[in-house]
Amino acid sequence: MSANEYTQIGWIGLGQMGLPMVTRLLDGGIEVGVYNRSPDKTAPISAKGAKVYGSTAELVRDYSVIFLMVSDYAAVCDILNGVRDGLAGKIIVNMSTISPTENLAVKELVESAGGQFAEAPVSGSVGPATNGTLLVLFGGSEAVLNPLQKAFSLVGKKTFHFGEVGKGSGAKLVLNSLLGIFGEAYSEAMLMAQQFGIDTGDIVEAVGGSAMDSPMFQTKKSLWANREFPPAFALKHASKDLNLAVGELKRAGLTLPAVETAADNYRKAVEAGYGGQDVSGVYLKLAEH
């Protein structure tokens, strides 16, 4: 590593994505201190050499760069407000998926306390997180980004610098809106084929050989074929992201029917009890009609 790269990182949040990402950092020679609200999740990381902290305040005290990978805006604010007095001189990198408007508010919170802020949400699910093939969607200054390139290269195959804070999270909502739209579109196609009496395996093979094929379809096709949807990216998280996208569109006075329709259908799927299914499991709600 070059002298200007961060070799010590604090990390808050060891969920489905956080755990494999921290594992990648440790395996790449970066020292990582971790905090997680549920201490039991820290055991496998501790065994790999991570330093486990009992409080966010202690972690922030010991590290100049702190990554957040938590569930939502409320969780981000709760953490940062709890350590506000210790943020002076610190760099906070938010990898959690929240909206551009929310990230700009977090930036103001951090900077008013004397820290620096950047956003770096990722595109990809547990498999890419484990393999280090995520896409890192960065928004913030190059001065913050450059020393983090090594860390980002360990968790992702490519880092996109979209510009200032707000643009990285905007890109994440663009990608996840497409994910939701594609998940619904493919699900509707499967249901249409069933209505015509076409075998699901046959239509899956036909779509896979057509111009409508995609890496997403290849990843998910067995789920539609088997009508079983174990989660790689949970439907409830896709619904949250689609709702964030719709909120941003409303603020901008922009109407995008496909995004709004997908958001509505994913919301209904969550309300129907399918939130723990894979994003492609919106099929189960659509199949009820």
Image (tube, rainbow, N blue to C red):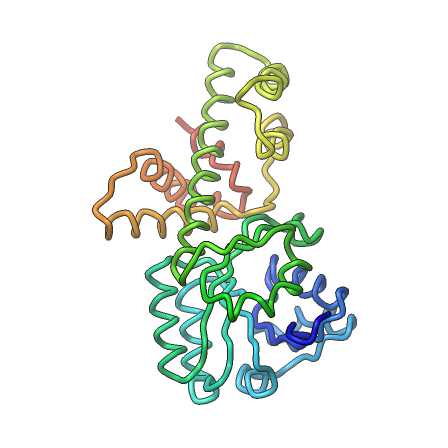
Viewer-proximal residue, 275 or 116? Answer: 116
Total numbered badges shown on the rendered structure: 0
Q: Is residue 87 above or below residue 124?
A: below
Find residue 10 and report its horizontal and vertical position in percent.
61, 76
Q: Where is residue 12 shown, x and y percent of the image?
A: 57, 72
106 to 220, vertically: above or below: below
Left-right relation of 132 to 195 = right
Q: Quadrant of residue 217?
A: top right
Q: Is residue 265 above or below residue 170?
A: above
Residue drawn at point x = 76 percent, y = 70 percent: 29
In which quadrant will I find the C terminus?
top left
The N terminus lies in which quarter of the figure? bottom right
- Nearest the viewer among 284 and 256 is 256
Q: Residue at coordinates 57% horizontally, 17% vertically from top-left?
A: 210
Q: Position of residue 66 (x, y in %)?
A: 55, 75
Kindly identify the residue that appears in the image at 38 percent across and 71 percent down.
106
In this view, the residue farthest toward the left is 253
Whether residue 26 is situated above or below residue 123 in the rendered picture: below
x and y, in percent, of residue 212 in the image? 53, 22
Q: Nearer the viewer, residue 242 or 128?
A: 128
